[in-house]
Amino acid sequence: MRARECRARIELRWETGARNCPGQAQLKKHEKTMKKIDAIIKPFKLEEVKDALGELGIEGMTVSEVKGFGRQKGHTEIYRGSEYTVDFLPKIKIELVVADGQVDTAIGAIIKAAKTGKIGDGKVFVSSVEQAVRIRTEEKGESAV
Ligand SMILES: Nc1ncnc2c1ncn2[C@@H]1O[C@H](COP(=O)(O)OP(=O)(O)OP(=O)(O)O)[C@@H](O)[C@H]1O
Ligand SMILES: [Mg+2]
């Protein structure tokens, strides 16, 4: 099996497949895969989402005030009691990098906390992260997040 394919199987925790990869049973600690979660949510849901993630032991996140629109193009959403007539609506973007094993739980917590059931509740995007470094200690990979 080609090294690249082995690596993919290990990262996907496809254990049977990975067992056929001699000498590659485990990735080195700093090579374990991590994911970045970008969650765009309604601003008033930030505290609730932050608390829910805190309860999971998530130890870091970045929050920004952003503007955006979804498929209604911002027109029909109500913000602070009045209908918005512009395209961009205020949203909060939460970015967090977590170990692969924490992704599903983190997404579940975000959805549970951020959902109102009305349009504009937001979206969650997940992408792969190659590396993370804690600058102070130079720890790398999962140990740094
Ligand atoms: N495809 C996208 N890429 C990047 N950001 C997006 C995308 N879709 C939505 N967003 C961001 O998420 C915010 C909320 O989107 P929203 O929840 O309105 O999506 P939607 O597809 O219109 O779903 P709904 O029908 O539930 O409103 C947007 O204001 C925008 O900031
Ligand atoms: Mg929408």
Image (tube, helix red, strand yellow):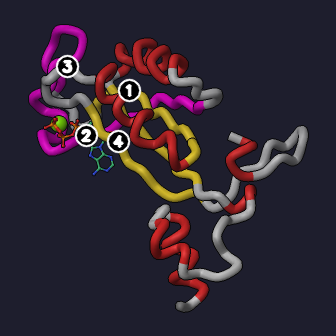
Q: Nearer the viewer, mark 2 or mark 1?
A: 1
Q: Secondary structure at mark 4?
A: strand
Residue drawn where x is 53% and y is 65% of the image: 11
| Mark 2 C-beta closer than 8 Å to ligand 1 | yes
Residue sitting nearer the eye, 40 or 74? 40
Q: Quadrant of ligand 1?
A: top left
Q: Is residue 83 left or right of residue 44?
A: left
Instruction: Determine which of the numbered discs, if any, sits on residue 2 in the image.
Output: none
Q: Is residue 74 left or right of residue 133?
A: left
Residue 6 versus residue 130 in the image, above or below? below
**Mark 2 / mark 3, whichever is N-terminal:** 2
Q: Which residues are magenta?
A: 61-84
Q: Secondary structure at mark 1?
A: helix
Residue drawn where x is 24% and y is 10% of the image: 80
Residue 78 versus residue 58 in the image, above or below? above
Q: Is residue 87 left or right of residue 60?
A: left
Instruction: Determine which of the numbered discs, if any, sits on residue 109 in the image.
Output: 1
* Image quadrant where residue 115 sits: top left
**Mark 1 / mark 4, whichever is N-terminal:** 1
Q: Position of residue 142 (x, y in %)?
A: 68, 47
**Mark 2 / mark 1, whichever is N-terminal:** 2
Q: Separation of disc 3 and disc 4 at Cα?
A: 15 Å
Q: Separation of disc 1 and disc 4 at Cα?
A: 11 Å
Q: Which residue is mark 4?
A: 124
Q: Separation of disc 1 and disc 3 at Cα?
A: 14 Å
Instruction: Determine which of the numbered discs, if any, sits on residue 69 in the image.
Output: 2
Q: Which residue is mark 3?
A: 116
